[in-house]
Amino acid sequence: MERKNLPFRINCEGYFLDSEGNIIAKESNGIVLFPGGGVDKNEEITKAMIRETKEETGAVVKNIRKLGTIKIFWGPNWAKTEKQKSRYTAFQGDEMHFFIGDIESFEEPEIKEEDFWDGNKLMNISEVIKKIEGKAPFDEDIRGYREAQLKFLKEIEEIVKDEK
């Protein structure tokens, strides 16, 4: 089957801030990660964003607004893990929905999912932007995604600066 005939995986990523202008993010293997993930069949995208954020970080979020959506086409070298390799055969890429919102509180979950973030979950937004920019130039596979991230994060950084 031709890749262009495959559907897109519906996915979400969120930028959630505390009152100090810190954002939920973590660094893993030199890459900055944000809460998010796949949207289940028949699940509302905003509800998926809330669910994924709580599962991964324990954060209860509010005032969620959509920032935008982009389509990411996976190149032949995209899949690194077994999970990604099976996704690569089912989807041509991600339809990524980006959100912004506020952190209401953090709750320690009774049962921690395998992708639960332990330790510090907050980073300074300006530091996050510097870390992502430090990885440029980006591989063709992730360029559109990283450019969208930086665009949204810089808009959020301006809002945070204006509020201080």
Image (tube, rainbow, N blue to C red):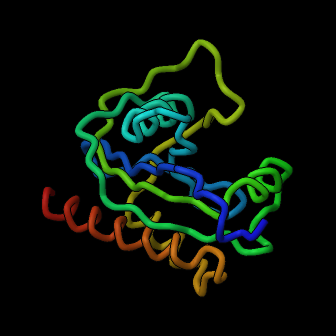
Q: Quadrant of residue 91?
A: bottom right
| Whole-percent x, y for residue 109 in the image | 55, 18
Residue at screen point 65% across, 66% down: 5
| Viewport quadrant of the C terminus | bottom left
Q: Quadrant of residue 76?
A: bottom right
Observer-nearest of 39 and 18: 39
Q: Is residue 101 left or right of residue 60?
A: left
Whether 88 is drawn above or below 11: the answer is: below
| Whole-percent x, y for residue 61 in the image | 34, 33
Residue that sits furthest to the right in the current view: 82
Observer-nearest of 90 and 139: 90
Whether 79 is drawn above or below 121: the answer is: below
Residue at screen point 22% across, 68% down: 158
| Viewport quadrant of the N terminus | bottom right
Residue that sits furthest to the top in the current view: 110
Residue at screen point 40% across, 36% down: 44
Q: Is residue 37 left or right of residue 66?
A: right
Observer-nearest of 91 and 15: 91
Residue that sits furthest to the left in the current view: 163
| Whole-percent x, y for residue 156 in the image | 28, 62
Q: How many marks?
A: 0
Residue at screen point 55% across, 35% down: 40
Q: Is residue 123 left or right of residue 115?
A: left
Whether 83 is drawn above or below 115: the answer is: below
| Whole-percent x, y for residue 67 in the image | 30, 58
